[in-house]
Amino acid sequence: MITEAEEIELALTGHRHFEECLLVDVRWRHYGTTIDFFFNYIWEDDRIRPQILDRPQLVTVRAYLVQELKLANAITETMAREPESLNWGFSEVAMVRLVADSPLLAPYRHHGTTYHHLAILWEGDRRIDMVFRGLDIST
């Protein structure tokens, strides 16, 4: 488990901050205190892999000791009227980033352990915000 902000940032950078990758699944583990985010990782060196939909390459971001998890889907009126029109493009992430000095961390500053704020961002207002203790990234 990676718990230091610098190491978490290095791990995210090593995965290009999951830029343009597809978030395909989220799962609860260990009584809801561990959360797995499964990304279809689209990058191969500096280019997009061929057949990203037909041959997904899953990379898991596992967050431990999750204190908060908030999803803002930003569903438009059109999406609400025609949910069948949604496709894989809706899950294409703009980036995953660590948020330094986040106000979400304020309630946990006196816990005797360091927590972090991770933001999964899409274009527009869609986002996931999570407060957690540590994470791992694996294939």
Image: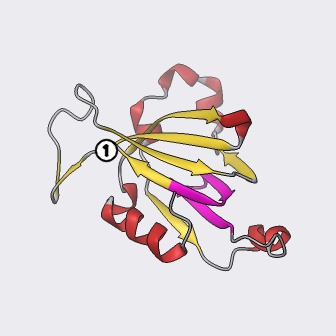
Residue 117: horizontal and vertical position, in percent? 64, 65
Q: Examine the rendering and report whether any part of residue 121 can be seen.
A: no
Left or right of residue 77, residue 89 in this image: left
Which residue is painted at 64% across and 67% down in the image?
A: 116
Count of numbered labels shown in the rendering: 1
Name the residue at the top extreme: 84
x, y percent for residue 13: 36, 67
**Label 1 residue SS:** loop
Query: Where does the magenta region start and end?
Result: 115-135
Residue highlighted by disc 1? 41
In depth, the one of 53 and 44 nearer the eye is 44
Pick the front one: 80 or 133: 133
Three-letter code for the amino acid on which mark 1 is drawn: Tyr
Q: Nearer the viewer, residue 77 or 37?
A: 37
Q: Residue at x 76, y 67 (%)?
A: 104
Q: Is residue 72 magenta?
A: no
When the figure is inspected, residue 19 is found, relative to residue 86, above or below; the finding is below
Q: Position of residue 81 (x, y in %)?
A: 64, 25
131 or 91, nearer to the observer:
131
In the image, residue 123 lies in the stretch drawn in magenta: yes
Residue 71 can be seen, yes or no = yes
Classify 20 as above or below 86. Answer: below
Q: Is residue 32 left or right of residue 138?
A: right
Quadrant including the C terminus:
top left
Q: Residues within 10 Å of mark 1 (few under 14, many from 20)?
A: many
Residue at 15%, 57% (x, y): give it.
45
Measured as percent of width and height from the top left, residue 67 is found at 75, 54
The color scheme shown is secondary structure
- Indicate left or right for 67 with 83 as reference: right
Q: Is residue 65 above or below residue 114?
A: above
- What's the residue at 16%, 60% (across, down)? 46
